[in-house]
Amino acid sequence: MNLVTYLVGYMHLSSSKSATIVTNFMGTLNLLGLLAGFLADAKLGRYLTIAIFASIAAVVRFGFPTDIYVDCSKFCELGITIKWL
């Protein structure tokens, strides 16, 4: 499933808002890659940078359960609007 479909289907956001969120997310990922490359080349060294970012990736990957998602359908049935961002 793609992220826009998830945001529209499960989070009940509009298509334009979902596309904006995904675009901002992808842009941030690309800029963080450039920042990590600069840090690796100029300041930290290759192996220290790999160790730092691999540690962060492992904490994020294994620190959060993957089967939890927010299902807004119960709120929508009750007429409760959820404002995201």
Image (cartoon, helix red, strand yellow):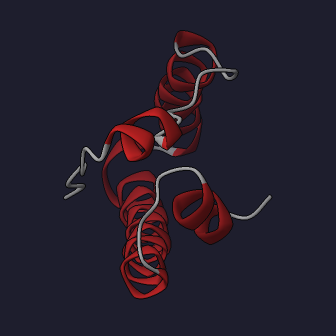
Q: Looking at this rendering, what residue extends furthest in the bottom direction?
A: 16
What's the residue at 36%, 79% (across, down)? 17
Left or right of 80 in this view: 30: right
Above or below, 83 against 67 in this view is below
Left or right of 27 in this view: 50: right
Q: Quick one: quadrant of the N terminus?
A: bottom right
Left or right of 34 in this view: 85: left
Q: Quick one: quadrant of the C terminus?
A: bottom left
Report the front residue among 12 and 23. 12
Q: Looking at this rendering, what residue extends furthest in the front direction?
A: 78
Above or below, 2 against 70 in this view is below
Which percent across, then down, holds residue 69? 57, 30
Which percent across, then down, holds residue 12? 46, 60
Above or below, 25 against 6 in this view is below
Which percent across, then down, holds residue 58? 60, 20
What's the residue at 61%, 14% (across, down)? 65
Above or below, 29 against 83 in this view is below
